[in-house]
């Protein structure tokens, strides 16, 4: 019969299995041979029934699972590779004492076809250096134990003598886990690309996220669950059921009542504080809802993350009939759950009403803030976009931000970035409909052109909305300085027009966000009586790359649609760089940024190298020695300077470049305005290692103190809270019968 199988195996598979089996040594060879023998035994069964290898799985191992993708020869090759790629024997528990990032715990009982399919998808996603997979086998009677044996050290296995149920198996797996994050996963799932990374990134980015859940899909692509609702009577409701996953109601991360334990990340420290899954719900059902209620009781959030996607074969392991069998525990445990949490459910949850599901599925529904800009943020392309992303991220701490763009340009990758951060997105047309259905507490309108078009319509649609005018920078100051520098009368007229528009918009708003203290001082005179705060560019400090001796060249970063940036490059290359290269032969100016004008290409012969848009700019900052910002006109805080300081890269700039950042010459930066002075400052910073190190240290520390997400985020949220509450417009403490929801984590 073995000869029969070998005859049926295609030549490519025979050769690859031979290389695999005979090319390994020791334990790896033995494990590879076991996988090969497993394939042979299945092939014998296939041959006896007149089937080929690709049909064998249907007969032997998945007669009751027609919706599971059939196994073929490549699946057995995958098993053999998994086994032969390990140099040690199978782990069966224990702890090597090393803490890692993530532990994925999978309880299983029979249904080996699902278990293999789950592991096959999972092991393609995980990084074995910082993630472990723990399978708790609840005394399966099918081929589960044998299949698991072929995964070698890729999977830690606990073999139970009896079926201990989901609750105990999960607690048992968590008990030997080494990860900071525990991820509980059903075996009747197939994880999709990015599933685990999205869960972990959400928890790492938001320290208040105690639990993070996924978007569950049916095999046909419809939504099974996009976050879950708990009604005040204890009944659970799977939000989004049967809908398209591309429906914008389900595409953004949000705070929810709970997420299904079929794919749920929990911080291990919280899991242990809560005593794991409560055994009153053994063997299964409502343990996940109970755990999430516990997480929230400790002051943490439960977050639904739609970029973590997986297919769930609902009912494959427990059935669907709640009247009998294992599924009946769903009815029994709902009563236990309600008894435990009825006080919280009555105070903080909506009464059962599917028509209010959209409200109930978002615990920040009552604290919605609309944010308008002319385009979706592209944070790796311009400083204004990076600032907007940080603003949205800060707002999402306490509010539910809805970002509205007037642009028709589609940037799917950047829109997904907003969704991951918990930001709902809409077009201007969508927003007109949203205004009729929702109550927005505030509207942040960014840039004068957008505010000119939308401020009045927003006021008319809902006079209760508090309007924040985000100037980005004072455009009329920037244009006036350009006109003074160039003598261009058209630019002077534009400056005057911007002054009239920005002043009128500021006076019609409830709050002004200025980009610098200098802009704030000017707007205090232009719009007296309207409160204003400084919301500059925001920067996370980064690890500081190579030391002085390992770096070379000068760096400039900017979006070249912004006229101050193109002027700065022309000025530096024509009037400064020749002098610099006399003292520093061979030094180059690296130009990074979108939309460079054609004439920049000619600067290559003069020592300027155009790199264009660089998606990952960290290596460029890490290798460059001095950042130059020869800005001759502009307004507000210059994001390029803050970004360079955040990487610890010394900066040489002008008086206008340093404006509004409280930067001191010779301490955090070097400041020079004339071509000769600027060139001398660049040469000093490039040559003097002591000066270079002092500027690097001081600049890096300065950004951390004054421009960090934490410090500016507090300014953003405090100012929005204050403007909402001004005039008694904040509707607080009305419970769930109105639009408000008691227990909402927003401050207003």
Image (tube, grey):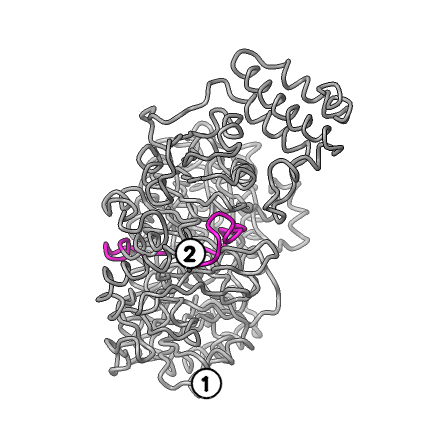
Q: Nearer the viewer, residue 410 or 677?
A: 410
Residue 66 visible in the displayed image:
yes
Image position of 556 (left or right of 612): left
Q: Residue at position x 48%, y 74% from top?
A: 448
Percent x, y for residue 132?
42, 33
* Residue at the spot of label 1: 456
Total number of numbered labels?
Answer: 2
Q: Is residue 188 above or below residue 712?
A: above
* Residue at the spot of label 2: 324
Percent x, y for residue 676?
47, 46
Percent x, y for residue 59?
66, 38
The residues colored magenta run 294-322
Q: Nearer the viewer, residue 460 or 683?
A: 460
Q: Residue at position x 44%, y 63% from top?
A: 238
Percent x, y for residue 667?
31, 44
- Quarter of the image for residue 9 reads top right
Image position of 260 (left or right of 113): left
């Amino acid at each position: 019969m073995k000869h029969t199988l070998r005859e049926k195996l295609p030549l490519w598979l025979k050769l690859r299995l031979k290389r695999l089996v005979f090319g390994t040594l020791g334990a790896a060879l033995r494990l590879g041979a076991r996988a090969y023998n497993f394939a042979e035994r299945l092939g014998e069964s296939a041959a006896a029934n007149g089937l080929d290898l690709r049909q064998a799985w249907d007969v032997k191992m998945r007669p009751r699972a027609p919706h599971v993708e059939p196994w073929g020869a490549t699946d057995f090759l995958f098993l053999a590779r998994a086994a032969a790629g390990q140099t040690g024997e199978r782990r069966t528990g224990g702890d090597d004492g090393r803490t890692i990032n993530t532990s994925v715990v999978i309880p299983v009982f029979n249904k080996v076809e699902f278990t293999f399919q789950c592991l096959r998808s999972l092991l393609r996603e995980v990084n074995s250096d910082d993630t472990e997979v723990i399978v708790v086998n609840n005394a399966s009677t099918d081929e589960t134990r044998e299949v698991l044996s072929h995964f070698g050290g890729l999977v830690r296995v606990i073999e139970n003598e009896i079926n201990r149920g989901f609750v105990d198996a999960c607690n048992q797996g968590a008990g030997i886990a080494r990860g900071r994050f525990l991820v509980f996963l059903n075996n009747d799932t197939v994880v999709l690309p990015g599933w685990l990374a999205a869960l972990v990134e959400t928890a790492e980015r938001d320290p208040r996220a105690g639990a993070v859940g996924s978007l569950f899909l049916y095999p046909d692509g419809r939504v099974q669950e996009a976050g879950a609702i708990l009604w005040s009577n204890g009944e659970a409701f799977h939000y989004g059921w049967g809908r398209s996953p591309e429906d914008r109601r389900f595409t953004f991360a949000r705070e929810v009542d709970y997420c299904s334990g079929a794919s749920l990340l929990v911080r291990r420290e919280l899991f242990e504080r809560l005593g794991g899954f409560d055994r009153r719900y053994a063997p299964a059902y409502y343990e996940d809802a109970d755990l999430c209620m516990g997480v929230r009781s400790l002051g943490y959030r439960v977050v639904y993350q739609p970029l973590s996607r997986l297919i769930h074969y609902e009912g494959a392991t427990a059935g669907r009939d709640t009247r009998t069998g294992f599924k009946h525990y769903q009815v029994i445990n709902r009563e236990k759950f309600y008894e435990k949490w009825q006080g919280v459910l009555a105070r903080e949850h909506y009464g059962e009403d599917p028509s209010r599901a959209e409200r109930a599925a978002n615990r920040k529904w009552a604290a919605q803030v609309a944010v308008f800009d002319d385009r979706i943020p592209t944070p790796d392309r311009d400083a204004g976009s990076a600032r907007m992303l940080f603003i949205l991220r800060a707002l999402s701490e306490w509010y539910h931000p809805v970002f509205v763009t007037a642009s028709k340009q589609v940037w799917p990758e950047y829109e997904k970035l907003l969704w991951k951060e918990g930001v709902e997105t809409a077009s201007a047309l969508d927003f007109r409909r949203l205004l009729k259905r929702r109550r927005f507490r505030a509207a942040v309108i960014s840039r004068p052109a957008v505010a000119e078009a939308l401020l009045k319509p927003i006021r008319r649609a809902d006079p209760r909305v508090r309007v924040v005018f985000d100037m980005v920078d004072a455009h009329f100051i920037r244009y006036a300085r350009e006109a003074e520098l160039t003598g261009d009368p058209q630019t002077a007229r534009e400056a005057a027009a911007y002054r009239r528009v920005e002043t009128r918009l500021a006076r019609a708003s409830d709050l002004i966000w200025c980009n610098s203290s200098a802009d704030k001082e000017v707007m205090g005179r232009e719009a007296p009586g309207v409160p204003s705060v400084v919301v500059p560019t925001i920067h996370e400090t980064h690890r500081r790359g190579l030391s002085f001796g390992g770096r070379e060249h000068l760096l400039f970063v900017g979006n070249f649609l912004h006229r101050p940036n193109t002027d700065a490059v022309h000025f530096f290359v024509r009037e400064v760089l020749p002098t610099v290269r006399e003292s520093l032969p061979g030094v180059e100016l690296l130009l990074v940024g979108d939309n460079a004008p054609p004439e920049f290409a000619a600067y290559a012969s003069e020592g300027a190298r155009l790199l264009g848009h660089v998606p990952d700019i960290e290596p460029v900052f890490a290798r460059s020695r001095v950042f130059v910002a020869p800005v001759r006109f502009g307004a507000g805080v210059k994001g390029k300077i803050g970004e360079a300081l955040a990487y610890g890269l010394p900066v040489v700039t002008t008086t206008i470049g340093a404006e509004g950042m409280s930067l001191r010459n010779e301490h955090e930066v070097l400041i020079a305005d004339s071509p000769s002075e600027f060139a001398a400052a660049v040469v000093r910073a490039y040559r003097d290692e002591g000066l270079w190190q002092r500027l690097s240290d001081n600049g890096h520390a300065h950004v951390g103190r004054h421009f960090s997400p934490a410090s500016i985020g507090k300014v953003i949220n405090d100012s929005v809270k204050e403007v909402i509450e001004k005039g008694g417009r904040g509707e607080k403490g009305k419970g769930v019968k109105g639009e408000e929801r008691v227990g909402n984590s927003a401050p207003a």
